[in-house]
Image: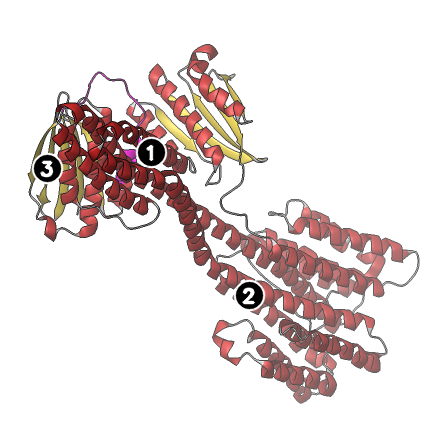
């Protein structure tokens, strides 16, 4: 058998929290105490003495549970170990309790890092057993294994709690690190450009010949901002997949998305986003597809993208628009292919090295600890079993089979479902019993552990009961007495709980670490997407407006110097505002207001030759600051689209209340109804996300011949 009457065990289940981990550990401790309580009548004469031995065993258990139950934390201290030691030694010396119970005391001392005292307790157990029975090796091993199991169970349960508690701080730290990284990148790339624009504009007021230099800097800074926004968005394929699905839906193509990669992607994201964009644009442009599947996967250090549609008739037709995408993927060391499959559908496939992740993988220290402890338990069990096998021809065979059992159990421990392992362990657990006798009865405990870890409770519990019954039947067939039969049956359960606890608690720590990693990844992605939105919506607009003002100032320098100087003065103010936008993009608070953006929109659109009409029905001072800021952002994006994507000559801006709701409407006459479909930009998606956080909605659609209408509502 694995444990004598009265050894501790260990239990853990892959469950989503520290509380369950504590319950599992407590359950195993109770199971151990039950072994000693059940053994009391057979080891102590008289009901009173047996009752006293049982009470002392319960006292040892209660002292151990103080280390497990959070509500008993205030009772933890050196005195609990003293009480536990007194109860354990009293039971062993005065009432004949198995010296294996001293393993609880040794385990508690290990938890307090009193290693020499723990070793002393194990040595005392060996001495007591030698004086009592003339043998010490078997019981010494039992006591040592008990101490290791107690120590490992409690430490793993503590690790579960620490890991769960650390997830939120680690997530916030990941977002903070990403924010600092973004700030360093943007301040270095864009801060100097904005400073140069501001200083150059001031000089150009007196020296108009320098306007060209300011214009060049503004154009370069705008390109840098757009490139940075694209880079931040490429950390995640999610925005590109969302845009692709929207484009396919608008074209009447049924889109199916199957995501199988981890985010953020890092540099691989930019390449795959570009491939996805080009592939989907070609699908829509052909206007023959009915379905399109977008699939991602990850493995072997590669991230893979696959886009399949049923609208391409020849491989040459499908690959024609993907030459540049193929070249860029291959230049980066990736693989690219495009062609017709056996099913007649056209598939575009790209594979790129995943590269370094912005968020590290969870460490496996706790999992390694559990495997080391399990290996120690298996080694101790094997030695105990071999001590019970007489030396002779059978001994090498027993050693080889026990080594096979241990290797099988360790190899299986790192896997999920048990597969064929229960069958293998069942054969190894029961077939050798007629040969090796009672020395082999304890092997079935590992079979019970396999059932508990690898199968649902509705299947594992009956199978464990059958295993225990099989052990009892085998013990009876070997002619053992009732006390020994009960001892072996209960020890089978305890051994199974030990395996269950070691493996399950470790997997729980691993799962919690993985969940924390996913939260940190999500925080990193969201921080990057937030920066991309702010760059696009805030800084992009400011730089586009500055660029427009610079062009206007240069044209007016000779024909209307006074107006040119006025435009340059406005550029200085706009550059100062852009620096505020840069602070927002790097994690600062937005300093926008709807009222200020209405005035800015009027100025910028008028400078571009667009007739502007403003109708306001809002009392801006009474408008909530956050609502005013988000509507100001919407207006910025709308004006940017008028300047960049249309041939508008007239733009109407309406603000007002509709009951409790606040609304902003921007209408322009620059829509070309005959223009081909193009992939949606990031702006509309960004604004939809911003408004949704305030319970708002956004609609953007054609509104009559040549008119485009954007409406935002909050409330």
Q: Is residue 686 magenta?
A: yes
Q: CA distance from mark 1 to mark 2?
A: 52 Å
* Residue 299 point in image, percent of width and height: 56, 35
Task: Choose mark 2 or mark 3, whichever is in front.
Answer: 3
- Nearest the viewer among 302 and 424 is 302
Side of 124 where 389 appears, left or right: right
Q: CA distance from mark 2 to mark 3?
A: 59 Å
Q: Residue at x 63, y 65 (%)?
A: 152
Task: Choose mark 1 or mark 3, whichever is in front.
Answer: 1
| Sequence-wise first label, 2 or 3 | 2
Task: Choose mark 1 or mark 2, whichever is in front.
Answer: 1
Colouring style:
secondary structure
Image quarter hosting the N terminus: bottom right
| Sequence-wise first label, 1 or 2 | 2
The answer to whether marks 1 and 3 mark residues whose Cβ atoms lie closer than 8 Å is no
SS class of the residue under badge 3? strand
| Sequence-wise first label, 1 or 3 | 1
Residue of label 1: 221
Span colored in magenta = 669-688
* Residue 64 point in image, percent of width and height: 59, 75
Q: Residue at x 80, y 67 (%)?
A: 479
Q: Is residue 473 magenta?
A: no
SS class of the residue under badge 2? helix
Residue of label 3: 654
Residue of label 2: 158
């Amino acid at each position: 058998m694995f444990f004598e009457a009265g050894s501790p065990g260990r239990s853990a289940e892959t469950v989503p929290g520290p509380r369950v981990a504590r319950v599992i550990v407590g359950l195993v401790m109770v199971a151990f105490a039950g072994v000693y309580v059940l053994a009391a009548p057979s080891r102590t004469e008289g009901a009173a003495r047996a009752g006293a031995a049982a009470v002392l065993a319960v006292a040892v258990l209660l002292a151990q549970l103080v280390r497990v139950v959070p509500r008993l934390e205030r009772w933890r201290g050196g005195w609990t170990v003293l009480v536990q030691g007194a109860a354990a030694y009293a039971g062993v010396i005065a009432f004949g309790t198995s010296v294996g119970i001293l393993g609880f005391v040794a385990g508690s001392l290990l938890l307090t890092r009193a290693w020499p005292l723990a070793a002393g307790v194990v040595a005392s157990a060996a001495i007591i057993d030698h004086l009592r029975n003339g043998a010490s090796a078997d019981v010494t091993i039992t006591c040592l294994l008990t101490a290791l199991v107690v120590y490992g169970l409690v430490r793993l349960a503590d690790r579960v709690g620490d890991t769960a508690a650390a997830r939120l701080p680690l997530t916030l730290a990941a977002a903070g690190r990403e924010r600092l990284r973004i700030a360093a990148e943007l301040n270095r790339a864009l801060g100097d450009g904005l400073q140069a624009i501001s200083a150059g504009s001031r000089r150009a007021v007196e020296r108009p010949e320098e306007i060209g230099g300011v214009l060049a800097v503004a154009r370069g800074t705008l390109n840098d901002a757009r490139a940075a926004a694209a880079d931040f968005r490429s950390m995640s394929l999610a925005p590109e997949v969302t845009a692709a699905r929207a484009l396919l839906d608008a074209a009447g193509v049924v889109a199916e998305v199957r995501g199988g990669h981890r985010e953020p992607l890092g540099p691989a994201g930019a390449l795959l986003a570009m491939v996805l964009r080009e592939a989907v644009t070609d699908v829509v442009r052909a206007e023959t597809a009915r379905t399109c599947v977008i699939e991602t996967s990850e493995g072997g250090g590669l991230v893979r993208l696959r886009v399949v549609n049923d609208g391409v008739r020849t491989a040459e037709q499908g690959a024609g628009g993907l030459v540049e995408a193929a070249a860029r993927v291959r230049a980066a060391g990736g693989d690219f292919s495009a062609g017709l499959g056996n099913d007649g559908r056209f598939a575009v496939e790209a594979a790129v090295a995943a590269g370094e992740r912005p968020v590290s993988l969870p460490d496996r220290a706790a999992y390694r600890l559990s495997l080391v402890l399990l290996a120690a338990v298996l080694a101790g069990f094997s030695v105990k079993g071999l001590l019970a096998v007489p030396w002779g021809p059978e001994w090498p065979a027993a050693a080889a089979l026990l080594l096979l059992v241990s290797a099988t159990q360790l190899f299986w421990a790192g896997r999920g479902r048990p597969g064929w392992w229960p069958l293998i362990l069942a054969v190894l657990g029961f077939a050798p019993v007629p040969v090796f006798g009672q020395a082999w009865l304890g092997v079935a405990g590992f079979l019970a552990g396999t059932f508990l870890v690898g199968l649902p409770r509705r299947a594992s519990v009956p199978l464990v009961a059958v295993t225990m019954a099989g052990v009892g039947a085998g013990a009876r067939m070997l002619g053992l007495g009732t006390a020994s039969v009960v001892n072996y049956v209960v020890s089978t359960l305890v051994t199974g709980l030990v395996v269950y606890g070691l493996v399950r608690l470790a997997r729980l720590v691993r799962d919690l670490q993985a969940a924390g990693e996913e939260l940190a990844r999500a925080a990193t992605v969201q921080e990057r997407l937030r920066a991309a939105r702010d760059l696009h919506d805030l800084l992009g607009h400011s730089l586009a407006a500055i660029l427009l003002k610079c062009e206007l100032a240069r044209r007016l320098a000779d024909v209307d110097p006074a107006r040119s100087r006025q435009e340059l003065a406005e550029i200085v103010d706009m550059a100062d505002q852009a620096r505020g936008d840069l602070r927002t993009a790097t994690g600062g608070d937005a300093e926008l207001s709807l009222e200020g953006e209405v005035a800015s929109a009027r100025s910028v659109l008028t400078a571009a030759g667009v007739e502007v009409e403003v109708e306001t029905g809002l009392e801006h001072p009474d408008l909530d600051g956050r609502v005013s800021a988000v509507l100001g952002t919407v207006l910025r994006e709308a004006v940017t689209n008028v300047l960049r994507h249309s041939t508008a000559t007239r733009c109407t801006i309406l603000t007002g209340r509709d009951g409790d709701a606040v609304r902003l409407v921007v209408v322009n006459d620059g829509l070309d109804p005959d223009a081909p479909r193009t992939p949606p930009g990031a702006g509309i998606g960004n604004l939809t996300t911003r408004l949704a956080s305030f319970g708002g909605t956004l609609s953007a659609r054609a509104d009559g011949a040549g008119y485009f209408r954007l409406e935002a509502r909050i409330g």
